[in-house]
Amino acid sequence: AREVGALAGGLEALLARAQGLHEAGDAQLAAHFADWAVDAVPESREAHALRAAVYRRLTETSTSTMSKGIYGAAARDSAALAAKEKDR
């Protein structure tokens, strides 16, 4: 994941692309970029906050019960990590 981050231009580039895709309504593709950002820099509160937002949108728009569970768990995990990092 760190290599993907480096190839993409770093954490800020991954986050910018994920945010742009999220705002454009492509949460599915935004999730990939958000995941790469979190995997590349796991301690990034900003990456976790964006990942949580993207996965919340996927949870809201999914019609599959199983997908809602998976997306919801990812959103909760990143939201908790974003809050934890914030408290440090």
Image (tube, rainbow, N blue to C red):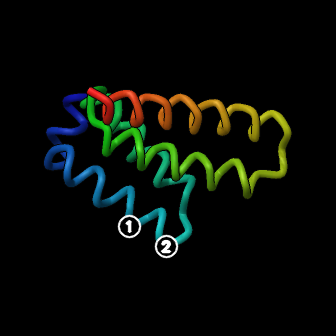
Observer-nearest residue: 9 or 11?
11
Q: Residue 76 falls in which quadrant of the image? A: top right
Point 53% across, 52% down: residue: 54
- Taking the image as shown, residue 58 lies to the left or right of residue 65, namely left
Which amino acid type corresponds to the residue marked 2 in the rendered image? Ala
Q: Determine whether the residue tagged by mark 1 lies in a helix, strand or loop.
A: helix
Report, in whole angstroms, how far the alpha carbon at label 1 lies from the one at label 2.
Answer: 6 Å
Residue 27: x and y, percent? 55, 57
Point 70% across, 48% down: residue: 59
Position of the N terminus, as image quadrant, is top left
Point 75% across, 33% down: residue: 69
Query: Is the residue 24 above or below the residue 76 in the image?
Result: below
Observer-nearest residue: 88 or 74?
88
How many numbered tags mark residues here? 2
Residue 36: x and y, percent? 35, 37
Q: Are marks 1 and 2 in contact (CB under 8 Å)?
A: yes
Few, some or many C-alpha atoms within 10 Å of disc 2 (few <14, some 14-19, many ≥20)?
few
The residue at which mark 2 appears reads as 24
Residue 39: x and y, percent? 34, 28
Observer-nearest residue: 46 or 14?
46
Residue 37 bears which disc, if any?
A: none
The residue at which mark 1 appears reads as 20
Point 52% across, 51% down: residue: 53
Which amino acid type corresponds to the residue marked 1 in the rendered image? Gly
- Taking the image as shown, residue 80 lies to the left or right of residue 3, namely right
Residue 75: x and y, percent? 57, 39
Few, some or many C-alpha atoms within 10 Å of disc 1 (few <14, some 14-19, many ≥20)?
some
Q: Determine whether the residue tagged by mark 2 lies in a helix, strand or loop.
A: loop
Q: Residue 16 falls in which quadrant of the image? A: bottom left
Q: In the displayed orientation, state which residue is furthest to the bottom.
A: 24
